[in-house]
Amino acid sequence: MRFTRMAAGAAAAVVTLSLTACGGGVENTEPGSAEALSTDRDITLSMAWWGNDDRAVMYEEAIDLFEEAHPNITVQTQFQAFDDYWTARATEAAGSALPDVVQMDLSYLRQYGATGQLLDLNGQVGVNLDVDGIDDSLISSGQIDGGQFGIPISTNTLALFYNADLLEELGIDPPAEGYTWDDLNEWTEQVSQAGAGHDPVVYGFSDYTGQLWFFLSWLIQQGVEPFTEDGQLNFDEAQMTEWLNRGQDLRDAEAFYPIKRTKQIEPLEGFTVGEQAAGMTWDNFLGSYEAETGQEVKMLPMPSGENGPQQFWKPGMLLSASSSTAEPEAAAALIDFLTNAPEVGEIFGTSKGVPATQAQIDAMDVEPGSVDERVVQYEEDVADVVTEQVPVPVEGVGALEAEFKRLSEELQYGNITVDEFVAEWFSIADSTVGQS
């Protein structure tokens, strides 16, 4: 079975993002101003990504193919878990020594692109980098003030995942079509009650209020754009308080998956060890979830808000080049290969999200019912509710996302109250957002 790019109307939902730089940055270059990649000398590149061992195997296979196509180029690689990855990149950035090519997340693009750490790839376009196969609306997500600081290599959207086999054991149906956030709370409590006598004990959900992207999704459903065009927060303490209080009754009833157990089993999750019936994250996690649980995992759209079901497309990830690279042409060529080469699409499938280029989608010649087929089918199924703009992250939002998670853990332990959470987060945000 082969797939086609999402319909134009759905693709248009990945709206053009006009990001305004907060300061610094590499001076823009005209497309096509770079030199062609040299083939008469040896070149060494460094590349870093976040992910697990499975992703590393896929990247190494893809890079081997790149090196075969470019015998004079050697790529040195490294990878870390997500949180450790950004700690390492921050240390390197302090010394203007990022790897030549870095896997980039939308939450961190402004932090690195607007402060002079990333190469403006505009000059490489049409020479060593082909972006013609990427939707204009998607390629714009990697731009800051006209500079192209990231190349989107995939798309994804949020989904609710549930363990169909485990729910069948408990005798409970998954959330009904069109379910709301209130419905999700009721369902979570129902599952946790039914799972109390199960071996092992099963909970319905972890505390979803502790994830910043879910809060942003909920804000959008309230008609609130989370960030302003000039890179500031567009929500207040009352709105965050309302969001966090959505989980307070379940925290009080100990109906969420226990935070103590969460820390005990890290880097695994309650969902992947069969102790939690459902969870929410990006749709490209389906493959790893099924591999880790060994059971059937299914997806539903996110809960509906006051205006019904509303979601957004997000670049699954981007590839960027360091502004300090000594080999900008080779770095661009590596990004081009990983973005466009059909063989790379065949290797990765949808593990990083649905590929951004048709050539890589076409390369996914997969069996009906496979993970790749189901992820693409999910995105086709929810295309009519993907009606909103992706929240354009402000500078520093990556650090604020980590702080949101940390404070949520303190809240779940009972060490702080919702009001204390909100006050501390906004205090940190006031000194972080827009600080270059």
Image: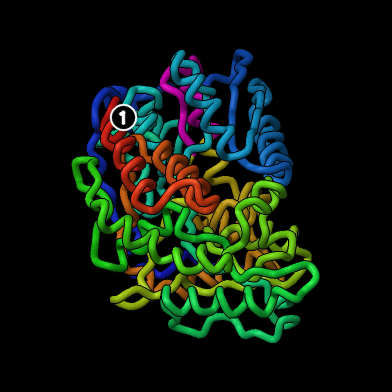
Q: Judging from the image, what secondary structure is the residue with disc 1 in?
A: loop
Residue at the image point whose x is 78% and y is 65% from the top:
294
- Give percent across and percent down for residue 27: 27, 23
Q: Is residue 301 visible?
A: yes
Compared to 1, does 322 lie above or below?
above
Instruction: Please state the extent of the stretch shown in magenta in the rendering.
Output: 319-334
Q: Is residue 1 visible?
A: no
Q: Quadrant of the C terminus?
A: top left
- Amino acid type at mark 1: Ala
Q: Quadrant of residue 243?
A: bottom left
Compared to 365, does 417 lie above or below?
above
Instruction: Compare residues 213 and 265 and report the one nearer the observer.
Output: 265
Specify the color scheme.
rainbow
Q: Quadrant of the N terminus?
A: bottom right
Compared to 18, does 31 lie above or below?
above
Instruction: Compare residues 253 and 271 and report the one nearer the observer.
Output: 253
The number of numbered badges drawn on the structure is 1
Residue at the image point whose x is 48% and y is 18% from the top:
325
Residue at image mark 1: 114
- Give percent across and percent down for residue 362: 58, 61
Residue at the image point whose x is 60% and y is 17% from the top:
43
Residue at the image point whose x is 31% and y is 38% from the top:
429
